[in-house]
Image: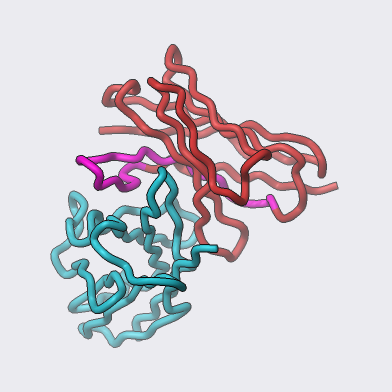
């Protein structure tokens, strides 16, 4: 059973960066794809990007291109999401999830608990 | 710009049947979008309900089912219960390792 445990809440100033971690256990990290999803207060879920750790391949939603960086440390089975140039609209709960694929059919099958990032001056 | 559409809200009576849909602002949803559905209660992480159009995730009761109806993906809940009252999101795969969430549907059971 895959478990994803995320780092704790953060408060950041506008213009700064935040880096959220997502530690995976269970299963084999090298076979994972990890994705990041965020949810602003009272809003819906928004896909941000994904990483295949074993290949170090990343893909990002166009909206976040240039501002988000997703990385992974295979030695600690931890994925990271760094968002830069923070603004108040980035205040949200950030979730990591594992993408499980069977052939071309992929879905988000295990989720972290979420990390609240608050951007405030 | 790809927009995945869902009904903002829906109501169902206890024991009733409701079908939530997931469409595209341009074009039709097909099985090639590998639609998946997630349930979220306030303050919690999403829970996977349905993937690959119509496959139930482990532990999900069979009163939840997925399908393609016309040009949309659909989530049908039969025999709605009080604890089904929460938010439901669909996700579509758009190719090139890009996924897009729908805006979510807030389901009320009353």
Query: Is A94 within the magenta?
Result: yes
Q: Residue at x 45, y 59 (%)?
A: B101
Q: Residue at x 45, y 28 (%)?
A: A57
Q: Nearer the viewer, residue B36 or A115?
A: B36
Q: Nearer the viewer, residue A69 or B70?
A: B70
Image colour for chain B is cyan
Residue that lies at the very extreme toward the left in this rendered image: B62
**Does B84 appear above or below A37?**
below
Question: From the viewer's perspective, is A108 left or right of A73?
Answer: left
Question: From the viewer's perspective, is B92 left or right of B78?
Answer: right
For the stretch drawn in magenta, the main secondary structure is strand
Q: Which of the image's four quarters has the N terminus of chain B?
A: bottom right
Task: List x then y, in percent, for residue A26.
Answer: 29, 26
Task: List x then y, in percent, for residue B46.
Answer: 40, 54
Q: Nearer the viewer, residue B70 or B21?
A: B70
Residue that lies at the very extreme toward the right in this rendered image: A121
Q: How many marks?
A: 0
Task: List x then y, in percent, for residue A79.
Answer: 49, 27
**Does B59 appear above or below B88?**
above
Q: Nearer the viewer, residue B73 or A79?
A: B73
Query: Is A100 within the magenta?
Result: yes
Q: Which of the image's four quarters has the C terminus of chain B?
A: bottom left
User: Where on the picture, by quarter, is residue A17?
Assistant: top right
**Does A57 appear above or below A39?**
above
Residue that lies at the very extreme toward the top in this rendered image: A75
Magenta-tinted stretch = A90-110
Chain drawn in red: A
User: Where on the picture, by quarter, is residue B90?
Assistant: bottom left
Q: Residue at x 37, y 33 (%)?
A: A33
Q: Residue at x 42, y 20 (%)?
A: A77
Task: List x then y, in percent, for residue A40.
Answer: 61, 57
């Amino acid at each position: 059973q895959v478990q994803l445990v995320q780092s704790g809440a953060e408060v950041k100033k506008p213009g700064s960066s935040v880096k959220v971690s997502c530690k995976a256990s269970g299963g084999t990290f090298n076979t994972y794809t990890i994705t990041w999803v965020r949810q602003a207060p009272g809003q819906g879920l928004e896909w941000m990007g994904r990483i295949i750790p074993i290949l170090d391949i990343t893909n990002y939603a166009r909206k976040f291109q240039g501002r988000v960086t997703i990385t992974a440390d295979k030695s600690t089975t931890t994925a990271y999401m760094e968002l830069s140039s923070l603004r108040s609209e980035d205040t949200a709960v950030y979730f990591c999830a594992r993408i499980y694929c069977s052939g071309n059919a992929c879905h988000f099958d295990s989720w972290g608990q979420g990390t609240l990032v608050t951007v405030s001056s | 710009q790809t927009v995945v559409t869902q009904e903002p809200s829906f109501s169902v009576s206890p024991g009733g049947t409701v079908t939530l849909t997931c469409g595209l602002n341009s074009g039709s949803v097909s099985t090639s979008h590998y639609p998946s559905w997630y349930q979220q209660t306030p303050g919690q992480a999403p829970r996977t309900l349905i993937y690959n159009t119509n496959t139930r995730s482990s532990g999900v009761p069979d009163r939840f089912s997925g399908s393609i109806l016309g040009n949309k993906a659909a989530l049908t809940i039969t025999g709605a219960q009080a604890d089904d009252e929460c938010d439901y999101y669909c996700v579509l795969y758009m190719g090139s390792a890009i996924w897009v969430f729908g805006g979510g549907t807030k389901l009320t059971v009353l």
